Amino acid sequence: NAREECLLINLCKASIVQEMKHVKSPQEFMRGNYTFMKLVVQVNRGAKEREFFSTLFQSLLDKVLNNNELDLETNPMVIYQKCISQEESATGQPSNRPFNINQAQALQSPDVLQILSEHLEMLRNITEEFLNAIINALDVMPYGMRVIARELRLVMEDNFPEVSPEEINKILGNFVYYRYLSPVITAPEQHIAIHHEISSLQRRNLAEISKM
């Protein structure tokens, strides 16, 4: 309810003030895992957040999850090994190519380069859709997360006056994305309605998208 939400937000704000007293630099903050960051997870579970996440991501996630052929793998060694497996399935014979090689060797394979290029192009197009949706939704982000981000900004400006506003914006953007938005992309069933089981391939696709 609204009272519990208010109390949780105020707890986050107080935690930010107390914990940031001991942070010596923005770099230390980026490496840290603080109590207020864990509280953000609880903020994520509110009804307003679920509605926001659904409006923001539902259609994009459905588009990804309903495409059973979509493969966004970008690891050259994994792509190489998949090529060998497909070759052996097609011919019924063991491949003459070595199975376990390093990344540099995998990138010397023309079929790996072609598939990697295709995957990167698809990934770029999909992540652009997600990024544009996030940018366009900033003004309707739930009040609680905006208050937490504002409090963190004010504290960082006080604690690190030598850091430029642009750098603080980058840090805040990283915080909001990786602590608030990215978990919805990588594990959407925990935040919005997903009507079918997510396969291991789809889970890897979501992980690749979340790295945007």
Image (cartoon, grey):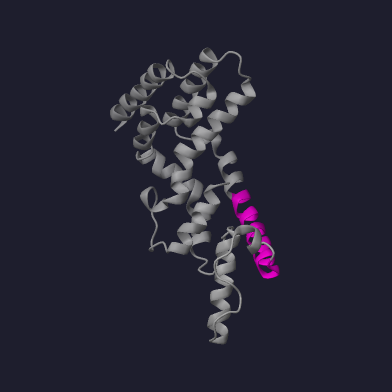
Residue 91 visible somewhere in the drawing: yes
Q: Is residue 76 magenta?
A: no
Q: Residue at x 58, y 65 (%)?
A: 79
In magenta, the rendered stretch is 109-129
Image coordinates of residue 149 in percent, x first then y, are 48, 26
Q: Quadrant of the N terminus?
A: top left
Residue 15 pos. (x, y %): 36, 21
Residue 21 location, quadrant: top left
Q: For the point 50% across and 46% down, which residue is it?
A: 56
Q: Residue at x 56, y 60 (%)?
A: 73
The residue drawn where x is 60% and y is 61% is 76
Visible residue check, residue 71: no
The percent position of residue 3, horizontal first and vertical second, equals: 29, 27
Residue 69's quadrant in the figure? bottom right
Q: Position of residue 191 (x, y in %)?
A: 38, 47
Identify the main secondary structure in magenta: helix
Position of residue 129 relative to residue 69, above or below, is above
**Direction bottom: furthest residue:** 92
Residue 122 is inside the magenta segment: yes
User: Horizontally, is 203 left or right of 83 in the view?
Assistant: left
Does residue 149 sit above or below 88 in this rendering?
above
Number of numbered discs overlaid on the protein picture: 0
Q: Is residue 202 positioned above or below 29 on the image? A: below
Task: Between residue 107 and residue 197, name the one nearer to us.
Answer: 107
